[in-house]
Amino acid sequence: MAKREKTIKIEPIGEVRNDFKEEIPEGYENLPSEIVIKEEYSEALYHIEENSHIMVLFWMDRVEGRRRKKMRIHPKGRKDLPLMGVLATRTPNRPNPIGVRAVRLIEKEKNILKVEGLDALNGSPVLDIKPYSIKHDFVEDAKPPWWVKHLWDKKE
Amino acid sequence: MAKREKTIKIEPIGEVRNDFKEEIPEGYENLPSEIVIKEEYSEALYHIEENSHIMVLFWMDRVEGRRRKKMRIHPKGRKDLPLMGVLATRTPNRPNPIGVRAVRLIEKEKNILKVEGLDALNGSPVLDIKPYSIKHDFVEDAKPPWWVKHLWDKKE
């Protein structure tokens, strides 16, 4: 694996603006955020508003080094949930804290995308934006582990 | 935006192994790949096999600099499809060529994940792995642009 084993350098294409200063609030699914794309990439957004939903890739820059070294966790910090590898959960505490979220695209205004449902903190660097694809991103027969179903059934 | 305007350095957590040397073949949706996770992260995969599907984030390292500077394209290089901003398409020719794909997880063997449906070239660095979440990644009411529907109807 040695040949390709090198650091990848990524320049963000923009950043998130919202009211989430320290943590993601309950009900973020219906709360607005703006994605401010650098002006040099404005043209790359051409016709993006034809999509009802987009996928946002962002860097969770508030996750410090020590939290990136954890290997196993109890999801949501709950001891009643089974111990899982971090890559088997959606915790931000992962080796490369890249967030991926499908959000509703409300409006485009020049280089600013107004969206709803983003779970990124204010100021998070944005790495990429993609149109949500029903063909590729929509997996109807996906089955989660039992404890995830359990949480949903109890609406936790 | 100046304060956070800095390069993000990412160390891959593994790499893709498959038979796709130069391009993604037709029918890749049913073809196998292996994701070889670095041994130091083996433990972070604990219990991942409880998920039927995972999301793979990978770096499309064969996309050279000049292809990352394009702003608008005709999807699939087809002049009969409307000109779109690159961020409004799933082209690999984007400022930060990060691939995101939901794949079927067939088997885990130590630090190797056998999957089906990955559209990454052999040797692509893997940045992150997440369990597919029906709650977050499944957007039932997503609507694509007219020309995407048109391609699907014609099965192109």
Image (spheres, coloured by chain):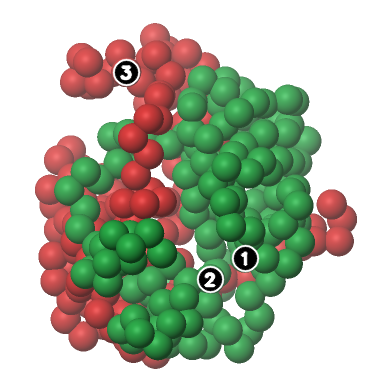
Chain colours: A red, B green
Q: Is residue B49 above or below residue B120?
A: above
Circle on res. B60: 1
Measuring 55% from the left and 82% from the top, which residue is drawn there?
B68
CA gap, disc 1 to disc 3? 34 Å
Dividing the picture into quadrants, the one containing residue A46 is bottom left
Question: Residue B118, image x and y in percent?
Answer: 58, 48
Q: Earlier in the sequence, mark 2 or mark 1?
A: 1
Which sits in the foreground, A114 or A47? A47
Q: What chain does mark 2 sit on?
A: B
Q: How many marks?
A: 3
- Marks 2 and 1, how far apart at CA: 7 Å
Residue B101: assigned label: none
Q: Secondary structure at mark 3?
A: helix
From the top left corner, tell me how far across and down residue B122 is, in percent: 74, 56
- Identify the element where label 2 is drawn: loop
Q: Is residue B105 left or right of residue B155?
A: right
| B106 shown above or below A47 | above
User: Do tag 2 and tag 1 residues touch (Cβ < 8 Å)?
Assistant: yes
Reading the image, the residue beneath label 3 is: A149
Q: Which residue is mark 2?
A: B92
Query: What amino acid type should be assigned to the residue bearing mark 1?
Result: Met
In the image, residue B64 sits, relative to residue B110, either above or below, namely: below
